[in-house]
Amino acid sequence: MGMSVIISVAEAEDAEQILKLQYLGYQSEAELYGDWTLEPLTQTLESLRGELTEQYVLVARLGDEVVGTVRGRIGPDGIARIGRLVVHPRMQRHGLGGRLLEALERRLAADGRPVTAYRLFTGHRSLGNLRLYARQGYRQTAVEHVDGGPSLVHLEKSAVAPLAATA
């Protein structure tokens, strides 16, 4: 019988596994853009440990192995900013990215501070990411052209639940 993937809040001792997964997961992005200086590839363990205390960081575990992660925070403007959604290459295309994103949205919404929208961004060539975000209800709001880097597609999803249809 196979193991189930469990999504939970990251612990301090997960930092090294998260950093290794992040490095592995962003290799395809670096190759796609010809840029191995992407911030997720150059982040230090110390910096990541700081993020574990400053943001919500979730992990997906398969047994003891961290096979997915995502992080986010709520700004003073009520906008929840989501980043670094990473799924181990062998676990991709099985819905884990969507599950992580939904779990983080629920966690942010339960924080007690009002959330008006969820925002994230991805590179313009990252078609798989763009499809995932569209399936999760995110809509493109802007494209930011970065000198010497990939264009960033900014996406947003309203945190307000749609009104139920009346009969």
Image (tube, helix red, strand yellow):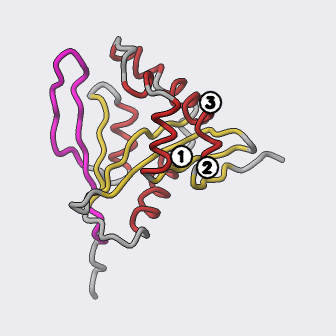
- Residue 124 image-quadrant placement: top left
Mark 3: which amino acid?
Answer: Arg
Secondary structure found at label 1: loop
Q: Earlier in the sequence, mark 1 or mark 3?
A: 3
Mark 1: which amino acid?
Answer: Gly
Please give the residue where the numbered disc 1 appears in the rendered image. 95
Gap in angstroms between the C-alphas marked 2 and 3? 23 Å
Residue span colored magenta: 139-161
Please name whichever residue, 9 or 43, is drawn nearer the observer in this view of the structure. Answer: 43
Secondary structure found at label 3: helix
Q: Earlier in the sequence, mark 2 or mark 3?
A: 2
Query: Label 3: how many residues lie within 10 Å, few (<14), some (14-19) or many (20+)?
Result: few
- Tell how many labels: 3
Please give the residue where the numbered disc 2 appears in the rendered image. 11
Please name whichever residue, 107 or 51, is drawn nearer the observer in this view of the structure. Answer: 51
Residue 13's spot in the image, x, y percent? 65, 43
- Kindly identify which numbered label has been placed on residue 108: none
